[in-house]
Structure formats: structure tokens, C-alpha cells
Amino acid sequence: MLLAYDGTDYCGWQIQRGTGVHENRRPSIEGTLTAVIQEMCGESVTLVASGRTDAGVHASGQVAHFSLEAKRFGKHFAEGLNSLLPPSIQVLDVRPVPNSFRAQRSVEKQYSYYFQQGPAPLPHLRTQTYWNRYDLNVEAMDGAIQSLLGEHDFLGFCAAGAQVSTTVRTIHEANVIRIPIPEPACLSLERFCLVRIRLRGTGFLKQMVRNIAGTLREIGEGRRPPEDIKAILDSKDRKNAGPTGSPEGLWLDRVFYGDDDDIAFLNQV
């Protein structure tokens, strides 16, 4: 399954197991999708995603897999699911793949973080971007992010509690650019724009992109020098990095797999 969702009203991808009967928990992306698949197919399924997005985080190219009896699947399967799903979650594509396929075994992922720049926040972007009160020096931010290219130990940008065997990751693409806000057209680029941080690499640690975004924000505001990015990498100490970026600005753009023809559609967002 190729999925897009607005994570604003969700606790994240993963189902949260509560202990109290009166807990007021937001639904999860996983739980909402699982319930709809089971409702439509009359069959219990286990949904596995390429990775677990946090509460409030969005996706335009999440990938998940599940097993289903062949007779349950038809050419209008995606349309059927979308008719039952809330507008905040939609299936972009769904196809049979070999039993050996595992969504979490991607070769690369791409994330974007969006700051909204302008004298006041635009209401229609308030849940998809993070409005920054001060003008950001995009050139300084882009210069700083280049230090992340290549293979590094990203422990300095990793949140506590990450259960991983290694914190070494490889970043293949990294940039910060200024882009226009598409609508409304009357907004001038000089006063209103988006500042996009984009990272593409072999994998990402817990809150790694949001911690990088928070650090770059301080660089863009002139509160710390661009050289701090490399210093944080070298220190391997999360306390040296900036604050964690707010979740509404983060998007999982794409998940990349191999060149197998059976899963090529997943690379074509």
C-alpha cells in the first residue's frame, strides 16, 4: 500500500495500548487503516509500515504491507478503502507483491520539514507547516546542512530511548531552499514563503529530522553558527543540538525500494 495522511488528529502511526478505560487517546493511523481493511474484507490483518511516524507528523508516500486472501482483492480495492477511510488518510495505490516483500526493508527514505515564513501565520497551513516568527537565513541553513552528507554517527541528533543497534546512518541528499506558497497567488515571495529542509538517506533515528530542523532553525535565526552542525555530530551528545522541531512541519515524502518490477510502483510517488 502507498499511503498519504494528515497526522494532525492522530497519535502517530502505531496503535497506542492504553491501560485505563477512560483514557482520552487520539486514534492511530495503523488502527484506523486496520479497522477499515477488516471491515471491508471480513478478515483480520496485521499492518506493517516502513516506519512509525510520530504524533502530528504527515506522510505523502508511506508504505505498508499486509497479508490477505487473494479472493478478497480486486481492481477497485483502493477505491473501496478510501470510501470508508476519513479524508485525512487515503490509499494512493495498492497492489499484490511477492510474499518476501517487507515494507520496513527500504533502501532509502526521504523526509521534508517545512517552516512557514511571513509576518503572520497563514491559517490554511497551520497544521502542515511550522510558522517561524523571524526571518530565516536560508543560505546559512543550507551551508550548515551540507555537513550531514555522507556516513556519520547521528547520536547527537537522536532522541533518548531509541532502540537501535547502531546510530550510524548515511545521508545522500540534504538541502534547504525557499519555495513559494502556492495559494493564494496574491502572496509575494518576498513576504510569504516556505522554507523546506529535505533529507534523503539510508535511514533515520528517533526524532532525528525534527532535531536537525530545530538546530537549523537556530542557525537560520543567527543564534548559533553553521559550524555547530559538524560540532554536534562530533560530540555525539544530544544536549548540544537545538530543540526538537514541532511535529506539524514534518513529512515523510517517499520510501525507496529496489529495482524489482513487482514493487516499482512504490518508487513512483
Image: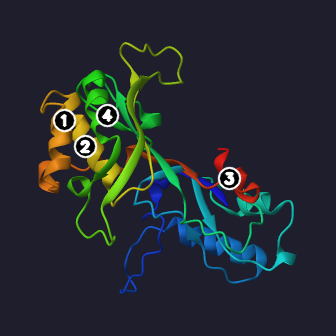
Look at the numbered disc 3 and give the secondary structure of its residue: loop
Mark toward the viewer: 4 or 1: 4
Q: Amino acid at mark 3?
A: Asp
N-term mark: 4 or 1: 4
Crowding at dot 4, Cα within 10 Å, few <14 / some 14-19 / many 20+, comes out as some
Local crowd size for mark 1, using a 10 Å CA cut-off: few (<14), some (14–19), many (≥20): some
Q: Is residue 214 left or right of residue 182?
A: left
Q: Disc 1 marks which residue?
A: 218
C-alpha span from label 4 to label 3: 28 Å
Among numbered discs 3 and 1, the one appearing first in the sequence: 1
First in sequence, mark 4 or 3: give its number: 4
Q: Earlier in the sequence, mark 4 or mark 2?
A: 4
Q: Does 243 sit above or below residue 105?
A: above
In the rendered image, the quadrant that contains the N terminus is: bottom right
Q: How many marks?
A: 4
Q: Which mark is residue 209?
A: none
Q: Which residue in the structure is indicated by mark 4?
A: 146
Label 4 and label 2: CA atoms lie apart by 16 Å
User: Mark 2 or mark 3, which has the lower sequence index?
Assistant: 2
User: Do the CB atoms of the residues marked 1 and 2 lie less than 8 Å apart?
Assistant: yes
Residue at which label 2 appears: 214
Residue 229 in the image, given as x and y percentages of width and height: 20, 40
Query: Is disc 2 placed on a helix, strand or loop?
Result: helix
SS for callout 1: helix
Q: Describe the element under mark 4 as helix, strand or loop.
A: helix
User: Quick one: 28 or 202, which is closer to the camera?
Assistant: 202
Q: Tell me, yes or no, if residue 88 can be seen here.
A: no
Residue type (three-letter) at the residue carrying disc 2: Gly
- The residue type indicated by label 1 comes to Glu
Marks 2/3: CA distance? Answer: 35 Å
Mark 4 belongs to which amino acid?
Gln
Residue at x 51%, y 52% (from the top left corner) = 108
